Image (tube, rainbow, N blue to C red):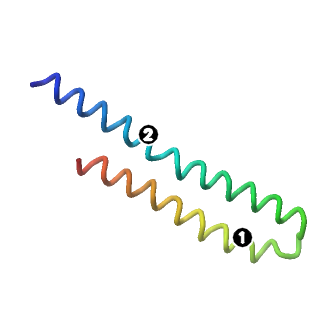
Amino acid sequence: MAEIATALAALKVIGYGCAAIGPGIGIGVATYGLCVAAARQPEMKGTLMGYFFIGAAMSEALALLGLVLFFIV
């Protein structure tokens, strides 16, 4: 019975790690887009930063949801 609990705990950790990959990639792509856009049009930097923070927050919400599910399951 202890082996099953240990295996389940290991699967939870692996599952959360897999769940955190998506938001990490999403924030990386958003940061790249922000850098490219700000380099092309520096005067739009303020507007772009607002959009970036909204997108990053949405992406990070997925990671936090995965963390919550990690503790629930």
Name the kind of residue labelled 2 in the image: Gly
Q: Is 23 rendered above or below residue 6?
A: below
Residue under the point 31% across and 47% down: 70
x, y (%) of residue 2?
A: 13, 24
- The mark lying in front, picked from 1 and 2, is 2
The disc, 1 or 2, on the residue closer to the chain's N-terminal end is 2
Q: Left or right: where does residue 33 sit relative to residue 57? A: right
x, y (%) of residue 24?
A: 57, 49
Q: Is 10 rendered above or below residue 29?
A: above
Residue under the point 17% across and 30% down: 5
> Which quadrant holds the N terminus?
top left
x, y (%) of residue 40?
A: 90, 65
Residue under the point 46% across and 62% down: 61
Name the kind of residue labelled 1 in the image: Met
Residue labelled with disc 1: 49
The numbered mark at residue 29 is none
Q: Is 22 rendered above or below residue 36?
A: above
Dot 1: element? helix
Label 1: few (<14), some (14–19) or many (≥20) C-alpha neighbours in 10 Å: some
Residue under the point 89% across and 70% down: 41
Q: Quadrant of residue 48?
A: bottom right
Residue labelled with disc 2: 17
Label 2: few (<14), some (14–19) or many (≥20) C-alpha neighbours in 10 Å: some
